[in-house]
Image (cartoon, rainbow, N blue to C red):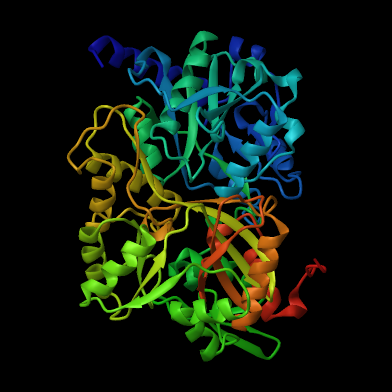
């Protein structure tokens, strides 16, 4: 920024009405402002504090927040005084405000060919926005609210649509302050920027922010503001890269159940991983006591009405040692399910030192899966092994995790995980292997790093592509190595396994799977005699009846299946007397 811009920026900061946190509007500004401005956003209201004549009136407005909504009071006069009027009802949001002055904005040179950014225009767009909000634990709105054309000048809804799949992978909302309250500063604000955690294409967030900023530049607006949580380092880095600057604007919200994590001290179980925390959060909501026994290994005890239950994530004392061993050893799982008439792939137990017999299996099956007989989280598993050389390496790798190694016939299709609780399917999701998308500028290793940052952010650090021999094998199978720069929009599947912990993505498909798949999963859980399990199937068609069951997991990650009620049904199983409503017969 040159000296002229420095002076202009300093002058704007001194005179900007929205940045005067202790002075009310005077003169022409006071005349033009629409008083007591409240804008309904569907998920709650944005309350423009600097349009209110007194903090008492603003306080009364905040106290009228709707049930299940999240109101935000912004641009406050004397926020400390407002808080003093109701410290039992209000709290200061731990967020920063950033502003992009449009005279400082520099358009980007990047062109996004994997997706397009457009206005939300149809009901399916609105449903997709709510899906993304739920995945990010945000409050949703009625789908009809997004489609209200009478407020299209006031609120602008943008979505990012993946061109190949036509799937909505991002959303952002803009609010025009001139339309809202005749803003003499001619400002705007950005709300609810959210990217689908399963989005593969890089740059979705940046593209939507730029698109919204340029939309308001075309309208003649002067700046755009946004609020971001103080510890959201990834988002803050993006905003600062685009030219946003920190400004002294604060938010105040109501103390309610939605906002509780922001105004209460962290519970002891906060250090648990997401798979344990989703259970302890649901337990606490029902008044069930939680005692953390070992936070490093995610052991905790739940207590209610004289009954207690020790859990390790979704594994509980209800799962017998026999049931656990049946799931832990993939040979036992395979044999029990095959005997019960359920469909499983062909399976062979091999000696890793007997290359001749292993090669004979490969010769017969042509394409195989190599995996340790025991293990979890995708460790040691190699999918679609085709050559004797690759077989030798993958057998050695699997043997590092378990001395007993199995080879299975490779079955092509979708990788489907079904969560069965108390012999009923509660959730189903397609798991897809990690795929990177070329930019024409970055090496494959750099694309993996970028992918890992996005996935780690979306999963609390649980999902990353490891740079190991299996990843290198898959990249070589695609005709590349880690140092190659691949062309823009070229896609490479860098792992063949779809496990979340090794970078895979997951998409809820509970509502569309064929009833035969549900029946097979429930029968498998009954055969294994296990109260909570994750059944892994390979299916050629989600809406068809064909399947093979490849594994059973005795400790499935319930957090991966939101918004399906996995944690609710889990607590129903452990403490049925606390259930608000129990699942009816299928």
Q: Position of residue 418 (x, y in %)?
A: 60, 63
Expressed as whole percent of the image width and height from the top left, the position of residue 278 reads: 56, 65
Identify the residue shown where x is 43% and y is 68%.
Answer: 271
Note whether residue 436 is visible: yes
The correct choice, above or below, for 416 with respect to 92 in the image is below
Q: Nearer the viewer, residue 36 or 548?
A: 548
Total tally of numbered discs in the picture: 0
Residue projecting furthest to the right? 585
Residue placed at 50% from the left, 73% from the top?
553
Q: Confirm whether residue 82 shows in the render.
A: no
Q: Nearer the viewer, residue 472 or 254?
A: 472
Q: Position of residue 29 (x, y in %)?
A: 59, 13
The C terminus: image quadrant: bottom right
Task: Name which quarter of the figure residue 118 lies in.
Answer: top right
Picture residue at 66% right of the left edge, 41% below the top: 71
Image point 50% across, 27% down: which residue? 163
Relative to 292, is 383 above or below?
Answer: above
| Left or right position of 278 against 180 | left
Q: Residue furthest left?
A: 483
With respect to residue 55, does 425 lie above or below? below
- Quadrant of the drawing holding the N terminus: top left
The image quadrant of residue 70 is top right
């Amino acid at each position: 920024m040159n000296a002229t811009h420095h002076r202009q920026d300093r002058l704007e900061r001194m005179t900007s009405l929205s940045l005067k946190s202790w002075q009310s509007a005077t003169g022409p500004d006071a005349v033009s402002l629409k008083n007591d401005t409240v804008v309904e956003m569907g998920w709650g209201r944005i309350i423009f504090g600097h349009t209110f004549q007194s903090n008492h009136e603003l306080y009364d407005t905040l106290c009228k927040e709707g049930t299940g909504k999240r109101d935000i009071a912004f641009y406050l006069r004397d926020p400390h005084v407002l808080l003093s009027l109701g410290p039992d009802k209000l709290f200061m949001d731990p967020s920063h405000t950033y502003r992009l002055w449009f005279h400082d904005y520099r358009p980007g040179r990047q062109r996004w060919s994997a997706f397009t950014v457009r206005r939300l225009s149809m009901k399916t767009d609105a449903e997709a926005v709510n899906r993304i909000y739920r995945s990010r634990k945000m409050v949703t709105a009625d789908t009809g609210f997004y489609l209200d054309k009478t407020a299209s000048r006031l609120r602008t809804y943008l979505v990012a649509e993946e061109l190949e799949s036509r799937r909505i992978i991002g959303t952002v909302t803009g609010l025009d302050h001139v339309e809202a309250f005749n803003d003499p500063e001619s400002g705007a604000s950005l709300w609810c920027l959210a990217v689908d955690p399963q989005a593969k294409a890089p740059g979705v967030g940046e593209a939507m922010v730029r698109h919204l900023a340029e939309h308001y530049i075309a309208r003649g607006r002067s700046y755009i503001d946004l609020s971001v949580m103080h510890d959201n380092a990834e988002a803050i880095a993006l905003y600062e890269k685009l030219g946003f600057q920190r400004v002294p604007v604060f938010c105040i919200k109501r103390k309610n159940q939605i906002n509780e994590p922001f105004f209460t001290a962290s519970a002891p179980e906060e250090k648990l991983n997401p798979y344990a925390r989703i259970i302890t959060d649901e337990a606490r909501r029902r008044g069930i006591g939680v005692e953390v026994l070992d936070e490093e290994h995610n052991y905790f005890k739940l207590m209610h009405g004289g009954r207690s239950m020790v859990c390790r994530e979704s594994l509980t004392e209800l799962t017998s040692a026999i049931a656990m061993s049946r799931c832990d050893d993939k040979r036992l799982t395979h044999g029990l399910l095959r005997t019960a008439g359920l469909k499983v792939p062909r399976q062979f137990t091999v000696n890793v030192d007997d290359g001749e017999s292993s090669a004979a299996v490969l010769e017969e099956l042509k394409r195989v899966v190599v995996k340790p007989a025991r293990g979890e989280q995708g460790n040691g598993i190699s999918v679609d092994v085709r050559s004797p050389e690759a077989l030798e390496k993958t057998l050695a790798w699997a043997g590092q995790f378990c001395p007993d190694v199995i080879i299975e016939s490779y079955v092509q299709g979708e990788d489907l995980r079904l969560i069965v609780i108390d012999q009923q399917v509660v959730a189903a999701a397609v798991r897809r292997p990690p795929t990177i998308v070329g930019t024409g500028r970055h090496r494959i290793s750099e694309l993996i790093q970028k992918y890992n940052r996005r996935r780690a952010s979306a999963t609390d650090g649980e999902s990353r592509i490891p740079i190991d021999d299996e990843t290198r094998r898959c990249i070589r199978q695609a005709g590349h190595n880690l140092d190659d720069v691949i062309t823009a929009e070229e896609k490479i599947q860098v792992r063949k396994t779809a496990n979340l912990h090794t970078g895979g993505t997951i998409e809820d498909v509970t509502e569309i799977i064929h009833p035969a798949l549900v029946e097979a999963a429930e029968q498998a859980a009954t055969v294994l005699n296990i109260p909570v399990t994750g059944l892994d199937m390979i299916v050629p068609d989600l809406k068809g009846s064909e399947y093979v069951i490849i594994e059973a997991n005795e400790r499935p990650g319930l957090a991966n299946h939101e918004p399906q009620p996995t944690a609710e049904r889990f607590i129903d199983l452990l403490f049925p007397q606390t259930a608000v409503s129990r699942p009816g017969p299928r």
